[in-house]
Structures are given as structure tokens and as C-alpha cells.
């Protein structure tokens, strides 16, 4: 895997990014001044510039050199508002085309909000776990290594929120499909497909988006004394594809000698809940969902399509608490495949836990946090320690690591990918 | 009716004079508990909104400034507070909401909204002794502490900034409390604390709170400028309230998840 790591002879801010960033920052100064002048009209412009460099622990090879300019522009007039979040990246010395992470229009009334456009929609109460967080797909090109806020992708559609006191109803319609970004083949984070032989993978089949084939979600929420509750449901395209067997060749006496698969997105029905409440010094939370006819990969000798459709359940139970100025969070997560078949690749039941501990120092200017995923079945883990220092109100310096423990399992498979990183973030 | 004898009449007269004198003394020098209850019960309006500027000063004199929009309201047996950070840029949009209850022993409900995560999260409210947003104020310092949580003793009267004050020493009933005692100077005219000293577990002066501006807004005395100084760390925090409005008609529905995510 190490040969796939891009080697950088020295760390430098690429000229292209520096030029682009300085130009944007110059324009920014003028625009921000205008925005402040127009503050009465509700115009704001803020954002950050960030540089981040990472290296593998084992051989010191750089695998991450990223500069980011993230702008958030908003303008509001009365009950209407506009928001845009253009982002300029330079990765591994290459300046990428600017992307619009979000851009939408808000319309609001006394009892409703309507948001139309490209937007992130975040559901659920779990930390680092996405059981009912089924609307916005994820960018898993670097597995779960980036900060959680950077994992989520925006979806394009309309969201209507209706309010009545402590109750709210959220309705989401997505006419355009946005898939999860999986790790690129050949990258550090490439997934190994669980087939008996290495398959030939055809181009993915994306959903044909027509009015009747859109995605639909609904969520009821209640916020009250002692507990908060959400009930949700969705009829949507699964953000990650199933691999459908297109052809396979069985050679007598040898077995499977050729296999061609096609990534195929398919519809899923899901219903779930999320609840959190206070019990003395504890904040307790639970989240769970039932997924109908989800496709699980299996032995192509047993399943002609290469997968079987099964209902599944996923849930978590967790607690947050503080002791001596340390904030702790614990979660237990269980995945269950119903009506299990032994020829499926995944286990019938998978158990995972998360653990987080955080503490601040120096009047909350220094934060130390360790977030961990623990694979309870394979004895593997991903440990993400991070130290953040607010050198000033606008300048943040940070350093961290991601350490994979174990030899197999969701986290142990990346045992060679332990990395460290440092960075700086300038907010404005 | 038989008229009382002269001797009895004299005795009754003496008793009335004594009782009157005693009541005058009592009115002039109420007990510490009565004073602190009066401070707690002081009219504060049904709701309040305003802009809070919080300046954190470290031991070297370096300042950090936070701008916070804040609304508070009293509804039946609970008080609600919502704070939304306006500055600095890296915390802009962060919101914090607290619901506290009159019911003895019932803990607060608290939520935080972090714009980057786009999620409202219920958080533990047990850290009453934790510092509020990196300041020299603890959450407990900023809350309405129930008078019944301490034993109060009136230790004397003094003048602060030209105002006659009662001096009340308050010792927590809970030995695990953050402080061993506090001493508060309370304006006799306004029934508002003008300064307070906080002593740590060893009985050493830890922090001093000074009120530098009180304004009457809509008939309610509102503290508009205050400073907490940590005498041991040599840090301080100034809080200044502006654009204060009292009884502007805030309702229960102004303290919701929607308000946290959209801002004030």
C-alpha cells in the first residue's frame, strides 16, 4: 500500500494556491467591508483558510498536503435568505476547481421554514455513527479519518420544516441522487471486495432520476424537559451500491475463474428513532433503525446476483458524563441482519463501540480529545487523538493522529495506515 | 369594662414602646436569609433580551472578546435562556440553551448547537462549577442560586460606591460546594448585590465580583456592567450588556431547537 502514497519532496504552499488564495483574500477584504456596510440588510461573509499536512507513521511518507479556503456568504432580507459555501482546495500540489459545498435559498414563516438547493441535512443523535443519519451521503474517500463535519456531503432538493410549540415535522424531497464517495481503488483506503476472486468491475449504474423516482424522507421531532425524541422514515436510494454479478465463469475442477460485477444503487425503506434524555449526571441516548430489503454481498456460488436482500436492524445506546473536568462519551452499536444466511459475507451480528474523552485547559483555549472506534468482534480499533490550541480568536493550531489497531475488521484492515498530521486554521 | 390600673397601664405602655423599638431594629437589620431571599425575589421582568459582550483577560493582559446575543424568559416554574455567539468568527452561530426549574433538586436541561456539525446536542448540566465559555464565571455564578442552598449571616453594613449596603456571609450547606463561603454587599435601596467575594475550599480569597453599572430599564434594575477577577490566577472577565429590553413579549416558542439553529 505504501507505494500508492504520494511522495512530496518538501512541504510547500503551492504557488497556484497561494496566488489564488491571496487573490481571493484581497477580494474578500473588499467584499467583507461591503458586507459589514450592508449588515443592516443581513449580509455576512466569513469562513476560514486552513493548511493541513499528514504523514504515515511507518515510513514518514506524506499522504496529505491540503490547503483549503472555505467561504460562507449569506444574505437575508425579511423572511428570505440566501447562503453559499464555495470552497477552494489545493491537494497534493494541485489546485482543484472550486466547489460549492452548499448553496440554497431559505424562506421562512411563523410556523414553517423552506430550504431549497444544495444542502447538508444531518439527522440522528449518535456521535460518529450514522444510523438514522440517512439523508446526506458521506465522503469516505479517506475512510473515517477526516473530522466528522467534513465527512458529510450535501444533497440537492427541498426541505420543509413545520413547527408547533415543541414539536416539528421535517419533510425532505430529493429529486437528484447523490451517492456516497467510496475510497478510490489503489488508494490507501481502498476497500477489498469480499469475492472469492478479484472481479472485473463495470461502471456503476446510477438511478434514473425522474419525478417519481426521487427520494423522500420525513422526521417528527420533540424537544422537551428531560428528553428529546425523533421518529424518522425514508424511501430512498441507498447511498452505497451493491455489486451485482453480471457474469461468472466456473471451471470444472478449479471453481470460479472469472467474475464481472456492476455497482448498482437500489431503493431502501427505513424507519427509525432517536432519543436522548438526562438522568442525574448522565445524558443518555439511543438511536435505532430498521432497513427493509437491504442488499448484503454473499458468495456468488450461492447467490446468482452476488447478494441477498435482507431486512436489517442497527441501534446504539450511549451515555455522556463529566468527571473531574473530563467529558466522557460511550456508545455501544449493534448491527443485526435478519433472516441470516450463512453464505453472506458479513456476520449476522456485528458489535462496535465508541469512546470519547475530552478536556479543555488554559481557559478553554487548549482542547485535548481522543475519539475511538472499537471493533468488539475483531478486536480492532481506530483511535483519533487531537490537540487544538486557540492561539488567538482567529488562529487555531492543531495536531493529531489516527491509529489503527488490530489486523482485521473494519479498522484493523488499515493497520498499515497509522498517520499523524498538523495544521493551522485562520478564521475570519 | 373595668379600666386597667395605672400600674398595668404603665406596663402595657412600656411593652408597646419596647415592641415598637424592637420592630424598628428588626426592620433596619433583617436577617441574612431575609435579605438574600429578597434579592432572589427581586422583580426581574418576565423576559429579557440583549447583547452581551464578554471580554476575557489573561494574566498577561491579553484580551479575547466574545459577542453573544441572549434572551431569557420565565415560564411557570421554569426559566429559559438562549445564547447565540456572534463573534469571534470561529464560534459564530454556536448556540447554548438552558432550562432551569424552580423544583428543588431538579437539574437543568442544556443543549448546544455547533454550526459545523449542524446538530443540536443535549449536554450534561452537572458541571455547575465548570467555567462558562472559558471565562472566570462558572455556570453556577451566572445562575440564580436558590437562597436555601446556603446559610446566610448578616455581618454588618458598609458603603459601596456611595450606596448603603448590607454585608451578608453565605456558607454552602453542601460541603462539596465549589466555594467555602461568599460575602456579598447588597444595596439596601436596590436589593441588588454590588460586589461579592468568593473563597475557595481552603478559605482563601479566590474571586471578586464587582458591579460597575446598574440601570433601571422598564422599572427593573438591570446589571449592565460587571467584572469577575480571579485573584489567584490574575485573570478577569468583563461582561457588558447592551440593547437590553425587558418584557418584550418573548414566548415559550422562542426557546426551541429552531431558534438555536437559525440564530437570534
Image (spheres, coloured by chain):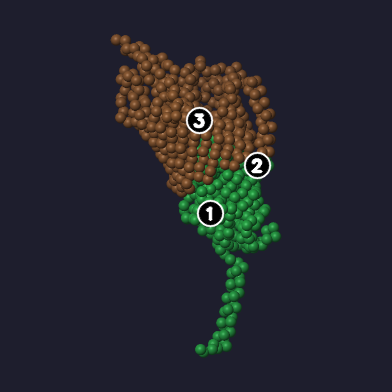
Chain colours: A brown, B green
Residue most toward the right? B162
On screen, residue B68 versus residue A118, left or right, reads right
Residue where numbered disc 2 is placed: A40
Give me the chain letter of mark 3: A
Kindly state the secondary structure of the residue where label 3 is placed: strand
Quick one: A95 or B229, which is closer to the camera?
Answer: A95
Residue where numbered disc 3 is placed: A156
Q: Which mark is residue A206?
A: none
Give me the chain letter of mark 2: A
Q: Are marks 1 and 3 in contact (CB under 8 Å)?
A: no
Determine if marks 1 and 2 fall on one subunit: no
Give how far apart the Cα atoms at labels 1 and 2 are.
Answer: 30 Å
Residue where numbered disc 1 is placed: B74
Give how far apart the Cα atoms at labels 2 and 3 are.
Answer: 30 Å
Q: Of callouts 2 and 3, which one flags the residue occurring earlier in the amino acid sequence?
A: 2
Question: Residue A93: where, in percent of width, then height?
Answer: 60, 19
Question: Residue A34: where, in percent of width, then height?
Answer: 68, 35
Does residue A215 lie above or below A94 as drawn?
below
> What crowding class fits label 2: few (fewer than 14 Cα within 10 Å), some (14-19), or many (20 or more)?
few
**Residue B203 visible here:** no
Determine if marks 2 and 3 fall on one subunit: yes
Does residue A428 lie above or below B223 as drawn?
above
Which numbered disc, 1 or 3, marks the residue closer to the eye?
3
Quick one: B231 or B256, which is closer to the camera?
Answer: B256
Residue at 63% across / 37% down in the picture? A43
Q: Are marks 1 and 2 in contact (CB under 8 Å)?
A: no
Quick one: A315 or A266, which is closer to the camera?
Answer: A266
Q: How many numbered marks, from 0 up? A: 3
Residue at 52% across / 36% down in the picture? A115
Displayed quadrant of residue A67: top right
Question: Residue A290: where, in percent of width, then height?
Answer: 37, 34
Quick one: A231 or A278, which is closer to the camera?
Answer: A231
Amino acid at each position: 500500500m505504501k507505494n500508492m502514497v504520494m511522495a512530496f519532496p518538501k512541504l510547500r504552499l503551492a504557488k497556484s494556491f497561494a496566488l489564488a488564495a491571496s487573490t481571493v483574500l484581497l477580494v474578500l477584504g473588499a467584499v467583507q467591508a461591503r458586507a459589514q456596510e450592508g449588515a443592516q440588510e443581513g449580509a455576512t461573509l466569513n469562513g476560514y483558510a486552513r493548511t493541513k499536512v499528514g504523514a504515515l507513521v511507518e515510513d514518514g511518507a506524506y499522504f496529505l498536503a491540503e490547503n483549503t479556503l472555505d467561504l460562507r456568504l449569506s444574505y437575508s432580507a425579511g423572511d428570505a435568505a440566501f447562503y453559499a459555501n464555495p470552497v477552494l482546495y489545493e491537494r497534493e500540489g494541485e489546485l482543484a476547481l472550486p466547489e460549492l459545498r452548499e448553496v440554497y435559498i431559505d424562506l421562512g414563516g411563523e410556523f414553517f421554514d423552506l430550504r431549497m438547493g444544495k444542502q447538508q441535512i444531518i439527522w440522528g443523535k449518535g456521535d460518529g455513527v450514522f444510523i438514522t443519519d440517512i439523508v446526506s451521503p458521506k465522503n469516505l474517500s479517506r475512510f473515517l479519518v477526516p473530522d466528522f463535519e467534513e465527512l458529510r456531503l450535501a444533497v440537492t432538493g427541498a426541505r420543509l420544516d413545520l413547527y408547533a410549540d415543541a414539536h416539528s415535522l421535517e419533510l425532505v424531497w430529493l429529486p437528484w441522487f447523490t451517492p456516497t464517495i467510496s475510497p478510490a481503488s489503489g488508494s490507501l483506503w481502498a476497500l477489498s471486495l469480499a469475492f472469492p476472486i478479484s472481479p472485473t468491475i463495470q461502471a456503476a449504474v446510477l438511478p434514473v432520476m425522474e419525478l417519481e423516482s426521487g427520494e423522500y424522507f420525513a422526521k417528527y421531532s420533540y424537544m422537551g424537559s428531560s428528553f428529546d425524541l425523533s421518529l424518522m422514515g425514508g424511501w430512498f436510494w441507498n447511498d452505497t451500491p451493491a455489486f451485482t454479478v453480471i457474469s461468472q465463469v466456473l471451471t470444472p475442477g478449479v471453481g470460479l475463474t472469472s467474475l464481472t460485477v456492476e455497482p448498482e444503487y437500489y431503493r431502501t425503506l427505513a424507519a427509525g428513532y432517536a432519543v436522548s434524555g438526562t438522568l442525574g449526571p448522565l445524558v443518555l441516548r439511543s438511536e435505532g433503525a430498521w432497513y427493509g430489503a437491504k442488499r448484503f454481498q454473499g458468495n456468488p456460488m450461492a447467490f446468482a446476483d452476488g447478494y441477498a436482500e435482507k431486512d436489517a436492524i442497527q441501534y446504539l445506546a450511549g451515555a455522556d458524563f463529566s468527571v473531574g473536568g473530563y467529558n466522557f462519551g460511550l456508545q455501544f452499536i449493534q448491527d443485526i441482519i435478519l433472516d441470516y444466511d450463512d453464505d453472506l459475507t458479513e456476520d449476522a451480528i456485528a458489535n462496535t463501540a465508541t469512546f470519547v474523552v475530552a478536556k479543555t485547559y488554559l481557559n478553554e483555549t487548549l482542547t485535548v480529545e481522543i475519539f475511538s472506534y472499537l471493533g468488539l468482534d475483531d478486536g480492532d480499533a481506530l483511535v483519533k487523538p487531537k490537540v487544538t490550541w486557540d492561539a488567538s480568536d482567529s488562529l487555531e493550531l492543531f495536531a493529531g493522529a489516527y491509529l489503527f489497531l488490530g489486523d482485521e475488521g473494519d479498522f484493523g484492515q488499515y493497520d498499515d495506515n497509522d498517520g499523524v498530521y498538523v495544521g493551522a486554521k485562520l478564521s475570519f | 369594662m373595668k379600666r386597667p390600673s395605672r400600674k398595668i397601664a404603665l406596663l402595657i405602655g412600656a411593652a408597646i414602646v419596647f415592641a415598637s423599638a424592637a420592630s424598628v431594629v428588626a426592620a433596619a437589620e433583617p436577617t441574612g436569609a431575609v435579605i438574600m431571599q429578597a434579592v432572589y425575589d427581586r422583580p426581574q421582568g418576565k423576559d429579557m433580551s440583549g447583547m452581551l459582550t464578554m471580554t476575557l483577560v489573561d494574566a498577561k493582559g491579553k484580551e479575547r472578546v466574545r459577542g453573544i446575543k441572549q434572551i431569557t424568559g420565565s415560564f411557570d416554574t421554569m426559566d429559559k435562556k438562549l445564547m447565540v455567539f456572534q463573534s469571534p468568527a470561529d464560534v459564530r452561530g454556536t448556540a447554548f440553551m438552558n432550562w432551569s426549574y424552580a423544583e428543588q433538586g431538579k437539574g437543568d436541561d442544556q443543549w448546544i448547537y455547533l454550526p459545523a456539525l449542524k446538530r443540536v446536542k443535549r449536554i450534561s448540566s452537572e458541571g455547575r462549577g465548570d467555567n462558562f465559555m472559558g471565562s472566570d464565571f462558572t455556570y453556577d455564578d451566572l445562575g440564580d442560586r436558590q437562597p436555601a442552598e446556603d446559610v446566610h449571616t448578616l455581618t454588618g453594613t458598609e458603603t459601596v460606591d456611595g450606596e448603603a449596603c448590607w454585608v451578608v456571609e453565605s456558607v454552602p450547606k453542601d460541603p462539596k460546594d465549589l466555594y467555602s463561603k461568599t460575602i456579598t454587599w447588597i444595596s439596601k435601596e436596590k436589593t441588588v448585590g454590588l460586589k461579592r467575594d468568593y473563597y475557595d475550599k481552603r478559605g482563601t480569597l479566590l474571586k471578586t465580583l464587582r458591579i460597575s453599572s446598574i440601570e433601571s430599564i422598564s422599572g427593573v434594575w438591570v446589571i449592565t456592567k460587571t467584572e469577575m477577577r480571579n485573584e489567584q490566577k490574575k485573570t478577569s472577565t468583563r461582561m457588558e450588556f447592551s440593547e437590553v429590553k425587558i418584557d418584550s413579549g418573548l414566548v415559550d416558542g422562542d426557546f426551541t431547537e429552531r431558534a438555536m439553529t437559525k440564530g437570534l
